Image (cartoon, grey):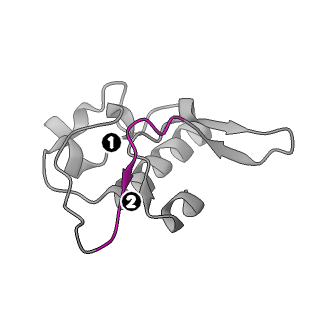
Amino acid sequence: MQHVHEHNIAHRDLKLENCFLDHNCRAKIADFGLNKLCGGENEQTMMTSVGTINYMAPEITGHAPYEGQPVDVFALGAVLFLLRTAKFAFGESGDVFYK
């Protein structure tokens, strides 16, 4: 994700299903269908709820304005939690955000 963010891109749908290892066990990120360019003077705060619920940051699920790269970092944390525990961080549906 650092490489992607260094190029001012927000993935916005980072999830385990979009993470792969190449033959040298280097991580690769796929599916940039929801990506957004970030930075620059014309940057607008995003409001659209995109992504997969189990990996969404609270600002997205709460329909608040958000910036793309910080929500990617949240999603990466959710991916790492899932890899470590074999469980979603907030339950199967992510419903912790809606209570």
Q: Give percent across and percent down for residue 27.
A: 70, 47
Q: What residue appears at the point 24 percent right and 37 percent down from the top-left corner?
A: 96
Q: What residue appears at the point 49 percent right and 62 percent down from the top-left corner?
A: 5
Distance between mark 1 and mark 2 Cα atoms: 12 Å
Q: Give percent across and percent down for residue 32.
A: 48, 40
The kind of residue on which mark 1 rests is Met
Label disc, if present, on residue 56 of the rendered structure: 1
Q: What residue appears at the point 30 percent right and 32 percent down from the top-left corner?
A: 94
Callout 2: SS: helix
Q: Give percent across and percent down for residue 71.
A: 35, 54
Magenta span covers which residues?
A: 31-40
Q: What residue appears at the point 47 percent right and 42 percent down from the top-left corner?
A: 14
The secondary structure that most of the magenta stretch takes on is loop
User: Mark 1–mark 2 contact, CB under 8 Å?
Assistant: no
Is 54 on the left or on the right of 44, as rendered? right
N-terminal of the pair, mark 1 or mark 2, is 1
Task: Find disc 2 in the rendering and name its residue.
Answer: 69
Q: Residues within 10 Å of mark 2 (few under 14, many from 20)?
A: many
